[in-house]
Amino acid sequence: MTASRFTYHVLLPLVLILCVNSSAWAQRFSVVSFKMLPNDVSAFINPVRDLNDEDCALVKVIASEDFAFSTPLGIVKRIDKTGEIWLYLPRGSKKITIKHPTWGVLRDYAFPGKVVSHMAYELRIEEPVAPITMSNVPAEVKVVRDTLVLTRVDTLVVRPPVKYVPFNLETVATISYGGRNGNILGGLLLMAMKRHGGFVHVAFDFSKIGPVRGECGITGETAGSTPFYTGRTRSSSFMINAGMAHRITKNLSVYEGAGYSSSSLAWQLAPSEGGGYLKNSHYSLKGISFEAGVSLVVGRIAISASVTTVKGKDWYGSVGAGIKFGK
């Protein structure tokens, strides 16, 4: 056999086989989507804390259990669920490396942004489809003569019943205490939802500080000196927050939101100083506020408790009781 005929009859089939196999070996998985799940409260209800005692973000990976994962900040906890993998990542994680024992490694896949505590995300992985192996052995065919077979299949599709979630409205009278001035505020909490909904919480102390002549520091100093005061003060506080509400069980709900709050304190000057009031800048604070709370319904009675912070400096605790309307 000549060299050219050897190449044609032997080497050419081997090259074709290697090309086919290399295409199969080159199959790789890929990340087809990564998105936030704003209505998923799994990470909020059952938080997992990292080494810095901060609540983690939860990434739900839609893939088989053979995959392994790593991030620059580490993975705090992994839970294998049916059809998905739950990864608890430290707050601020922005990359993940994905490994598979057969299909290789996808290094440093970058999230659209840094993950946030208490939030849930979905990462969907597309896995290669295993090639179909064709057998060269001809299938055995059985021939039945003079036989007519008629098969009829009746299929009845039964859809599972959809669980009805009734609409509820909770009206709760609240009392709040806190802040640098030790303010007491009366308020009203309204919460409307089915499985998810919203809330509004308004609270104030029914008072005003009135007109002031200027401002003073924490000890009353102003313009480089400390005037005399009568010891009488005026204070005023209010807050309004709104956000989302979520039903956890039939009787238990949680809510979280943001808004605006203001707290002011004024000191009265002595008659020898000309009278009037000075606003104490240390004990007066206003700005964005954040509120998180829980509501429990017993029969028709709704009981709530929440915590509110203003810029992370002033803190208020609120409790309340009211009535639930609806089923």
Image: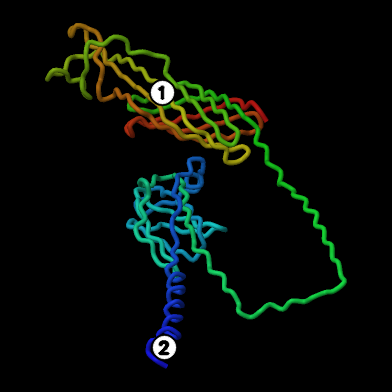
The numbered disc on residue 239 is 1
Label 2 SS: helix
Instruction: Give the residue drawn at x 28%, y 9%.
Output: 211
Q: Residues within 10 Å of mark 2 (few under 14, many from 20)?
A: few
Q: What is the C-alpha distance between the residues marked 2 and 1?
A: 89 Å
Image quadrant in which you'd find residue 262? top left
Spot occupied by residue 195 in the image (x, y as percentages of width and height): 59, 36
Which residue is at the far left?
224
Residue 161 on image: x %, y %: 71, 43
Report helix, strand or loop for mark 1: strand
Tag 1: residue type? Met
Q: Amino acid at mark 2?
A: Phe
In the rendered view, does 77 fall on the left or right side of 169? left
* Residue drawn at point x = 46 percent, y = 22 percent: 202
Question: Vertically, is 104 above or below 42?
Answer: below
Across and down, in percent, residue 231 comes to 27, 15
Q: Which residue shows up at 29% across the image and 22% down it?
A: 284
**Residue 268 figure quarter:** top left
Camera-side residue of 198 and 126: 126
In the rendered image, residue 233, in percent from the top left (x then y), is placed at 30, 15
Of circles 2 and 1, the one toward us is 2
Give the side of residue 226 with respect to residue 200, left or right: left
Q: Label 2 belongs to which residue?
A: 6
- Image quadrant in which the N terminus is located: bottom left
Residue at 50% x, 25% y: name it: 174
Say which of 303 and 9 sits in front: 9
Which is nearer the eye, 128 or 13?
Answer: 13
